[in-house]
Amino acid sequence: MHASLNKAKTSNFWTNTLRVLALLVVIGITVLIYVIRDHVKDFAALGYPGIFLIAMLANATVFIPAPGAAVVFAMGSIFNPLGVALAAGTGGALGELSGYLAGFSGQAVVENTELYNRIRPWVKKYGGWTILVFSAVPNPFFDIAGIAAGVAKMPLWQFLLFGWIGQIIKMAIFAFAGAHSMNWLARLFMK
């Protein structure tokens, strides 16, 4: 009995430690993004790795908008749009871990908001499919879905896989729109 009590205390300690670390990582990433926000576009000069970094940083902020989609739109007209979508989608999925970690930490500020309470049942009922839809559609609510996934202790691999697929869909829309709009504008002004 005494050994199982010690095991439970040790497990609780490590869980609480991980939660605190997750919260600190989220806060640190958000502060870093805010500090370097004016220089994010400079990463575009790095090509696909720069696009990956921009998307990762833009999606790593929790509730603070960053210029990721606009850069993906512009880069779609310069680089291969499919390559841009893959780089940005992968970076975006990894960046979205900040919301998941905020939820996993148990310190999510939104847990008692009406919007969170509306999204949480979807995450619990449909799991990764909810993450895919919220990440594929441009909307400001994905952070809340990510937090709900973290609170629900959705398996990390599931969150990343469905988030990655959704991010690639969304980034492909922006990249191909950028590629085709630039072609359209070039034809329009070349006449």
Image (spheres, helix red, strand yellow):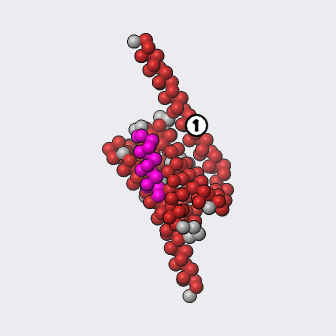
Residue 120 visible in image: yes
Residue segment shown in magenta: 154-168
Residue 174 lies, with reference to residue 12, above or below; the image says: below
Q: Residue at x 52, y 66 (%)?
A: 81
Query: Residue 23: where, in percent of width, then height?
Result: 54, 37
Q: What element carries label 1?
A: helix
Asked which quadrant contains residue 48, the reply is bottom right
Residue 94 lies, with reference to residue 82, above or below; the image says: above
Type of amino acid at the residue the image marks with label 1? Leu
The N terminus lies in quadrant: top left
Q: Residue at x 62, y 49 (%)?
A: 33
Q: Is residue 123 left or right of residue 144?
A: left
Mark 1 surroundings: few (<14), some (14-19) or many (≥20) residues within 10 A: some
Query: Residue 38: where, in percent of width, then height?
Result: 66, 56
Q: Is residue 155 magenta?
A: yes
Q: Does the magenta stretch include residue 130?
A: no
Identify which residue, 137 or 56, lies in the foreground: 56
Q: In this view, does 111 lie to the left or right of 44?
A: left
How many numbered dots are placed on residues in this image? 1
The C terminus lies in quadrant: bottom right
Identify which residue, 157 or 108, lies in the foreground: 157
Q: Which residue is drawn at 53% across and 71% down?
A: 179
Q: Is the magenta stretch mostly helix, strand or loop?
A: helix
Q: Is residue 62 left or right of residue 42?
A: left
Query: Residue 159: where, in percent of width, then height?
Result: 43, 45
Residue 23 lies, with reference to residue 42, above or below; the image says: above
Asked which quadrant contains residue 158, the reply is top left
Residue 70 visible in image: no
Q: Residue at x 57, y 67 (%)?
A: 79
**Residue ranking furthest to the left:** 125
The residue beneath circle 1 is 24
Query: Residue 37: where, in percent of width, then height?
Result: 64, 54
